[in-house]
Image (tube, helix red, strand yellow):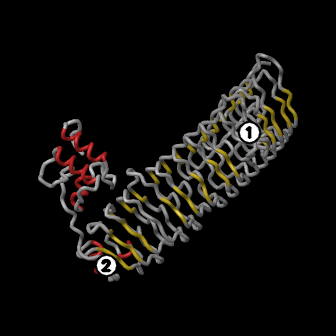
């Protein structure tokens, strides 16, 4: 025998044993070949097999273990999905490079008794595809790389819903080569308490750790740049530090994190928005520092959170609908007199005292909606200065560089206006670097400060 037809034994519910031919010409177990053989208890896959097709053994509910030989280089999606009693899978010698993605179901999707999985160790295995172990509710991770399960170092792709619904998974270590954790990769892993993310990780995708109730804290490496929508939504997080490498925290990342108490946002010039629903219903979050880079607070950003006081810097140009609507808010300070505050009574919590400058948008909002307003006085007048023009004569010359050097040597003191003009690199300090920059400008080595 060289070939079996697709679905050849499909739904043969009385079939208990199968002996496949050990014939070099017989290389493929076709799609759905034994799908629904609910009484099949064991299968021996000979060394001549190279391909196991799509859904080949799906819903073989009596199958308890399987060993995949080195000869197998391809396993189709859903190959062993919903094998309800499957407990042990040995892929250690398999020649596969991936557990392929399925449209809705993965290779071991729904194998609720699967506890021991040995993935290939050849170094060629790179991808745990979409839904690969979804709803494998008994699967546990081995931190010391003994049984029952661990992810090999060769893996570079953890795809969408790879471990979605793995209720018994209590820890996971992400290999160094992984750049992105896929959408819903660990969604609903209710026991997941210990996550070690890798240096080199760039993206935590949508709902990656959504509904991980046991996850109290997580160290996000400083290689991560993007945290996508709902990444940690409805999780058990209590504290999180977001590194300065992160420039995007998308909508709802921490919404319904009802135990979240401490958040440190990134100091990154590209981090400019607190997106919609980011801290929605974070009822234990009492305070937060908003970086000066932030320009927009989007819809429902802090809705029903536990925030009691918040200061919005001069950089914040707009706050949107319901963005600060929470009954816990006692004080909100607007340092931008022209900040656009969405014209709605519920934009700011009803009990909040609003602080702002005279004749500011904050004052106008407070008066319109009968809120208590506390004045910060007149809007500060920021002097107009010509950067580099330390002596204020209207020109940038070598004399200015010399004056900066004299200030550094404490031979002369600068006014506030002179300090602003002399700080050419805008680092908040006056140093020899500023004098050098002026010299380079005068020499026409640079065109602007």
The crowd level at tag 1 (other Cα within 10 Å; few <14, some 14-19, many 20+) is many
Would you name the residue on which mark 2 appears?
Answer: 366
Taking 385 as reference, is 255 left or right? right
Gap between marks 1 and 2, in whole Å?
63 Å
Q: Is residue 57 visible?
A: yes
Mark 1 element type? loop
Q: What mark, if any, has residue 20 been given in the picture?
A: none
Residue 341, given in percent of the width and then of the height, sits at 32, 69
The circle drawn on residue 80 is 1
Q: Quadrant of residue 324?
A: bottom left
Q: Measuring 83% from the left and 39% from the top, which residue is drawn there?
A: 65
Q: Is residue 311 above or below residue 203?
A: below
Foreground of the two, 118 or 286: 286
Q: Residues within 10 Å of mark 2 (few under 14, many from 20)?
A: many
| Residue 183 drawn at (x, y percent) | 56, 47
Q: Is residue 102 visible?
A: no
Q: Secondary structure at mark 2?
A: helix
User: Viewed as shown, does residue 247 lie left or right of 131?
Assistant: left
């Amino acid at each position: 025998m060289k070939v079996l037809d697709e679905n050849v034994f499909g739904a043969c519910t009385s079939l208990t044993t199968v002996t496949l031919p050990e014939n070099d010409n017989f290389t493929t177990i076709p799609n759905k070949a034994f799908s629904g053989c609910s009484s099949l208890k064991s299968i021996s896959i000979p060394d001549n097999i190279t391909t196991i097709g799509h859904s080949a053994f799906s819903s073989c509910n009596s199958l308890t273990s399987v060993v995949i030989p080195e000869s197998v280089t391809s396993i189709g999606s859903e190959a062993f999905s919903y094998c309800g009693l499957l407990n042990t899978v040995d892929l250690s010698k398999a020649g596969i490079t991936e557990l392929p993605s399925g449209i809705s179901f993965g290779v071991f999707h729904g194998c609720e008794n699967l506890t021991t999985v040995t993935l290939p160790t050849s170094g060629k295995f790179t991808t745990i595809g979409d839904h690969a172990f979804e709803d494998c509710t008994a699967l546990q991770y081995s931190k010391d790389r003994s049984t029952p399960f661990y992810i090999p170092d060769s893996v570079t792709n953890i795809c969408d819903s790879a471990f979605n619904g793995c209720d018994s998974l209590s820890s996971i270590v992400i290999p160094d080569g992984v750049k992105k954790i896929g959408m819903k990769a660990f969604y609903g892993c209710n026991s997941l308490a210990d996550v070690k993310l890798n240096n080199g990780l760039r993206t935590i995708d949508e709902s990656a750790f959504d509904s991980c109730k046991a996850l109290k804290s997580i160290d996000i490496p400083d290689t991560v740049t993007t945290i996508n929508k709902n990444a940690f939504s409805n999780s058990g997080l209590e504290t999180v530090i977001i590194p300065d490498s992160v420039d995007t925290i998308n909508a709802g990342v921490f919404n319904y994190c009802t135990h979240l108490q401490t958040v440190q946002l990134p100091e990154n010039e590209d981090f400019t928005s607190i997106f919609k629903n980011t801290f929605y219903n974070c009822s234990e979050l009492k305070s937060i520092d908003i970086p000066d880079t932030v320009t927009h607070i989007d819809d429902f950003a802090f809705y029903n959170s536990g925030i009691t006081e918040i200061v919005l810097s001069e950089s914040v140009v707009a706050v949107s609908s319901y963005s600060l609507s929470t009954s816990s808010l006692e004080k909100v300070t607007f340092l931008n007199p022209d900040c656009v505050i969405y014209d709605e009574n519920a934009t700011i919590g009803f009990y909040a005292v609003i602080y702002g400058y005279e004749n500011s948008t904050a004052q106008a909002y407070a008066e319109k909606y009968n809120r208590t307003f506390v004045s910060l006085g007149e809007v500060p007048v920021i002097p107009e200065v010509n950067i580099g023009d330390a002596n204020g004569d209207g020109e940038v010359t070598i004399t200015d560089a010399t004056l900066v050097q004299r200030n550094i040597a404490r031979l002369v003191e600068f006014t506030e206006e002179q300090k602003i003009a002399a700080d050419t690199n805008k680092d908040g300090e006056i140093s020899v670097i500023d004098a050098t920059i002026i010299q380079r400008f005068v020499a026409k080595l640079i065109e602007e400060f």
